[in-house]
Image (spheres, rainbow, N blue to C red):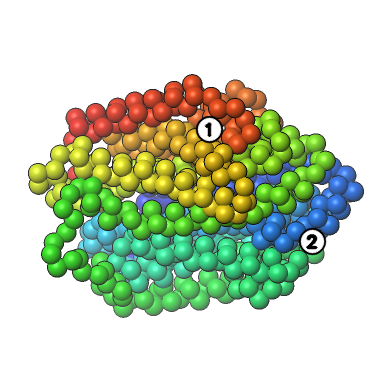
């Protein structure tokens, strides 16, 4: 039997399982890119405005570290500059999640062993996972290239292929890590850590030079994307770096896959403590999620330091640009520009924190569907106590990461410690509402629980792109974040905060009531 037997069936199965995840993540990424040209046109509509922007970026190392250098003043080049790094990172996250889900997740749950007992080749599952990631990356490339074609066909194709290239580099990297580790959670964490390192290397390189020529920039796949120079005399040969890296990593992954047993890994998990496991359901939840909490905590603190350090420079960059000022104020409230920028950046971290709380809540779903919850509940542990441990980590962890983000802002900005910490903590009711929706879906309709990612994606889209598109307030109010007071700088409104907190509590209570009454997934 060929080692690829059954690949086609497994690809169709993977795409069916990801019929929500792939469209949502690709749509969010595509909309983020395609809405940017009109936004930039309204901000920098004249050649003089764009030339002034390039001059300011040349002298602002902090902003280059955050976004990257810009190589031309056309709207296409400015679009690639403004969203390239973040669109590439989002493409990488999408691809690595797909690959780990259909490789190590399947082995950890025992489903891969069942599949392997049939007419399925040894490397069919790995091939199917990589093909699913390739399809998602290709769709993203086609949508981006088609949507940006009006800015220049060559640049649009280059940018689309660059995003797909970043996705496939991290897809094949995740395939390697999935062979090395015994845990899907660890595989995702390690690959995400590599992505974070790639961002840091690119940022360090871009802060040192204004032309992307730093060695540190070239070490990072995200640096390759910016050095592709879409819409600015494209360097087509850079695409060979993506293709070569993906091919080499795929070959390594295939080689490793043929040298281990199903369910095993080259780096076995560490044995537990000799004196037994965690003494309670809450302690078990903490042990299972401590790595994620630590990673998010470090990331939010560093993000706060970076954004805090950029605050004064960002205010100078906006300057007298009325449209840019209007967008910042729509995101951060009608206040002094510096406070509005701080409020906008803190609000963005609040939106991202909603992704953390959804991931943490859905850990319950993963424990249940994998069968690991059953032996825990077979002991003297009730469902509510078991779920409560994970929810404490989810909602308490959200408070922790926002507090650390605030401390990071204080370190980076060096002023307004009290107002900044208050602004970070006031995001929590909206974050908890998103988490409450995830709990409600999991408790009452567990098979629909992954749709919570769609809710978080829609909230992120409204908060990120809505103000730039001048969306009506009634549309922005569909997000719980649209009802929060704009701090620092704005007035505190306890009414909406209290309502959101009560709504979050009601959603969690409804989800737990549903969990208590329904059958567990078998």
In contact (CB < 8 Å): disc 1 and disc 2:
no
Compared with 441, 299 (above or below) is: below
Compared with 431, 49 (above or below) is: below
Compared with 43, 157 (above or below) is: below
Q: Residue at x 29, y 45 (%)?
A: 390
Q: Is residue 235 visible?
A: no
Q: In screen coordinates, is 340 left or right of 303?
A: right
Secondary structure beneath label 2 = helix
Q: Position of residue 159 (x, y in %)?
A: 68, 58
Secondary structure beneath label 1 = helix
Q: Position of residue 151 (x, y in %)?
A: 78, 49
| Quadrant of image for the C terminus | top left
The outermost residue toward the right is 48
Badge 1 or badge 2: first in the primary sequence: 2
Q: Position of residue 286 (x, y in %)?
A: 28, 52
Crowd class of label 2 (few under 14; some 14 to 19; many from 20; radius 10 Å) = some
Q: In screen coordinates, is 230 left or right of 26?
A: right
Q: Residue at x 62, y 51 (%)?
A: 413
- Res. 411 mark: none
In front here: 45 or 324?
324
Q: In screen coordinates, is 370 left or right of 22?
A: left
Q: Residue at x 59, y 32 (%)?
A: 486
| Quadrant of image for the N terminus | bottom left
In front here: 118 or 332?
332
- Res. 58 mark: 2
Q: Is residue 15 visible?
A: yes
How far, Cα to Cα, is label 1 from label 2? 34 Å
Q: Residue at x 14, y 50 (%)?
A: 375
- Res. 481 mark: 1
């Amino acid at each position: 039997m060929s080692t690829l037997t059954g690949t086609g069936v497994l690809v169709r199965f993977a795409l069916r399982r990801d019929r929500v995840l792939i469209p949502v993540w690709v749509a969010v990424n595509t909309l983020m890119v395609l809405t940017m040209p009109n936004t930039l046109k309204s901000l920098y509509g004249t050649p003089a405005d764009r030339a002034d922007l390039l001059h300011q970026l040349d002298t602002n190392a902090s902003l280059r570290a955050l976004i990257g250098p810009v190589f031309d003043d056309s709207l296409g080049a400015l679009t690639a500059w403004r969203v390239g790094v973040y669109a590439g990172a989002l493409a990488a996250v999408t691809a690595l999640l797909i690959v780990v889900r259909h490789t190590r997740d399947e082995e950890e749950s025992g489903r891969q062993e069942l599949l392997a007992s049939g007419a399925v080749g040894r490397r069919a599952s790995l091939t199917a996972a990589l093909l699913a990631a390739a399809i998602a990356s290709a769709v993203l490339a086609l949508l981006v290239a088609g949507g940006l074609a009006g800015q220049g066909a060559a640049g649009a194709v280059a940018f689309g292929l660059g995003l797909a290239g970043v996705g496939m580099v991290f897809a094949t990297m995740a395939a390697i890590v999935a062979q090395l580790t015994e845990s899907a959670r660890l595989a995702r964490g390690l690959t995400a850590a590599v992505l974070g390192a790639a961002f840091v290397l690119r940022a360090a390189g871009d802060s040192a030079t204004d032309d992307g020529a730093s060695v540190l920039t070239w070490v990072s796949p995200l640096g390759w994307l910016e050095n592709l120079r879409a819409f600015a005399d494209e360097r087509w040969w850079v695409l060979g770096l993506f293709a070569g890296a993906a091919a080499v990593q795929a070959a390594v992954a295939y080689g490793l896959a043929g040298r281990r047993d199903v369910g095993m890994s080259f780096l076995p998990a560490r044995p537990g403590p000799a004196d037994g496991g965690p003494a309670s359901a809450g302690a078990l939840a903490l042990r299972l999620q401590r790595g994620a909490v630590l990673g998010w905590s470090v990331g939010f603190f560093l993000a706060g330091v970076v954004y805090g350090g950029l605050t004064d420079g960002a205010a100078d960059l906006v300057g007298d640009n009325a449209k840019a000022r209007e967008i910042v104020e729509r995101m951060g409230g009608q206040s002094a520009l510096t406070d509005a920028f701080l409020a906008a950046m803190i609000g963005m971290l609040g939106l991202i924190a909603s992704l953390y709380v959804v991931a943490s809540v859905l850990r319950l779903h993963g424990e249940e569907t994998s069968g690991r919850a059953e032996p825990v509940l077979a002991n003297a542990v009730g469902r509510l106590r078991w779920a409560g441990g994970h929810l404490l980590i989810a909602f308490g962890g959200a408070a922790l990461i926002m507090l650390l983000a605030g401390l990071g802002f204080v370190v980076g900005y060096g002023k307004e410690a009290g107002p900044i910490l208050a602004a970070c903590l006031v995001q929590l009711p909206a974050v908890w509402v998103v988490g409450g929706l995830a709990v409600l879906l999991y408790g009452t309709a567990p098979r629909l629980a992954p749709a919570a990612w769609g809710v978080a994606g829609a909230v992120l889209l409204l908060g990120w792109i809505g103000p730039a598109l001048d969306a009506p307030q009634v549309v922005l109010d569909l997000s719980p974040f649209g009802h929060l007071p704009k701090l620092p700088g704005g007035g505190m409104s306890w009414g909406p905060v209290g309502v959101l907190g009560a709504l979050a509590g009601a959603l969690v209570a409804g989800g737990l009531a549903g969990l208590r009454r329904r059958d567990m997934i078998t």
